[in-house]
Amino acid sequence: RQQMYGCDLLEDGHTRGYYQIAYDGRDFITFDMDTMTFTAADAAAQITKRKWEEDGTVAEQKRHYLQNTCIEWLKKYVSYGR
C-alpha cells in the first residue's frame, strides 16, 4: 500500500490538500477535500469507500488533518528555510 498526501498554502491564504492511496502501484481511493467525498478506483476500493462513508468520521478526520495539522507543519518547515 502506498499513500500520498499533502497540502498547499496559497498566496491568497487559502489552502488545498490531497490524499490518495494506491495498492501495488495502482490507484485505489482518493479523497476530495472540497466535496468531502471518496472516489474508489475499482470494485475492490468500493468496499473501503462504503466502510469509510458508513463510519461518518473518516472524511472529517482527513479534512482536519489536511486543513490544520498539515498546514501547521508546512508553515513550520517553510520557516526553517528563512
Image: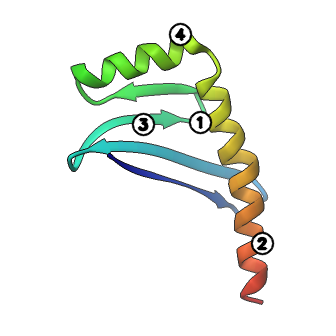
Which numbered tag is attached to residue 76? 2
Does the CB distance between marks 4 and 1 fall below 8 Å? no
User: Where does the image place residue 2, in percent across and percent down from the top left?
Assistant: 35, 50
Q: Quadrant of residue 41?
A: top left
Mark 4 and mark 1: Cα distance apart in space: 17 Å
* CA gap, disc 2 and disc 3: 26 Å
- Residue named by callout 4: 54
What separation in Å lies between label 3 and label 1 (alpha carbons)? 10 Å
Residue 78, image quadrant: bottom right
Instruction: Choose the circle earlier in sequence order: 2 or 1.
Output: 1
Labels 4 and 1: the sequence-earlier one: 1
Q: Inspect the image, locate mark 3, and give the three-letter code of the amino acid beneath it.
A: Thr
Decide which of tag 2 and tag 3 comes sooner along the chain.
3
Q: Which residue is mark 3?
A: 30
Q: Earlier in the sequence, mark 4 or mark 2?
A: 4
Q: Is residue 17 above or below residue 38?
A: below
Q: Residue at x 71, y 75 (%)?
A: 77
